[in-house]
Amino acid sequence: MPELPEVETIRRQLAPLVEARTLREVEILDPRWSRPLAPAELAAALTGRRVEHLGRRGKYLLWTLAGDVYLAQHLRMTGSVLADPDPEPAHTRVRIQLSRGRCLAIVDPRRFGTGELLLGGDAMEAFFAARLGLEPFDERFTAEHLRTLARGSKAPIKALLLDQRKVAGVGNIYADEALFRAGIHPRRPAGRLTGAQHARLREAVGEALQAGIDARGATIDDFRHVDGVRGSFQDQFLVYGRAGEPCVTCGSPVVKMVVAGRGTYVCERCQPRPRRPGARPAGRSGRQPAPR
Ligand SMILES: [Zn+2]
């Protein structure tokens, strides 16, 4: 699924193509995309409006249109936006004709992508306030902020990173990459991280996302750039997708496990497994804690 770096990559490529142009014609071919509105209702609300700005909130593309109208577009699992594709791709769900002759196709084989109409800045802010925590690049996203989010939580730290209402934009890939960079096991209970670990994790989330943006995103399944080209960050993953391969830091094999319901990649030497409360180190009858 496209995460923050992939959506940001699309935004950067698409913004110069759409800003200051008008949505001449919008054809929504799949009623799932516009729900709860009917395709014709959403198309009527968008058609004729000038694109003032193309932004991003978490994993959403945020279209700011003339007249204080917004479109919150989510690509979900397999969505992409292609400019002037020829021929029109299979699985095109939305067709947009822009002024001065450009055409966009929103393509989505699995059909989970959505476009939601938001009328007015207040409605737009309320929509995101209910769904998204701070952006990891927000200056308020500090170690202290992470610590506040995690306080008292027994859930694994990976689950916290994946929760969009806590941290906007991080998904399965970048959560694993960030936890590896921070040397923190994804199963570690969020509320039991030390202050130093919160600080390292905050840094690591930013570094992992920035590396993904610099490589113009990762293509695992269907993610495409606006011109149809695949991202390249999948070639630079430190742990994600590397089960059985040597850790880039210590050479131990990377292992795959399920954490927070998701396939998760870990080097258990660089990211020591949390000890269960009350558990004794194996084979030592509790005399001395095993060295870690
Ligand atoms: Zn390692």
Image: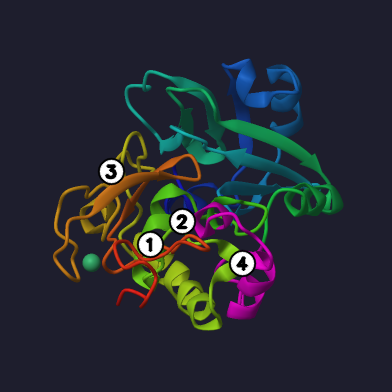
Q: CA distance from mark 2 to mark 4?
A: 11 Å
Q: Nearer the viewer, mark 3 or mark 1?
A: 1
Residues marked 3 and 2 touching at CB (< 8 Å): no
Q: Residue at x 44, y 48 (%)?
A: 172
Residue position for label 4 = 191
**Amino acid, disc 1:** Arg
Residue position for label 2 = 187
Decide if ligand 1 comes within 8 Å of the CB at mark 2: no
Residues marked 1 and 2 touching at CB (< 8 Å): yes
Q: CA distance from mark 3 to mark 1?
A: 35 Å
Residue 283 against residue 31 in the figure, above or below: below
Residue position for label 3 = 230
Q: Residue 169 placed where, x, y %? A: 54, 54
Q: Residue 101 placed where, x, y %? A: 48, 35
Q: Which badge, 4 or 3, is on the more N-terminal residue?
A: 4
Residues marked 3 and 1 touching at CB (< 8 Å): no
Q: Which badge, 4 or 1, is on the more N-terminal residue?
A: 4
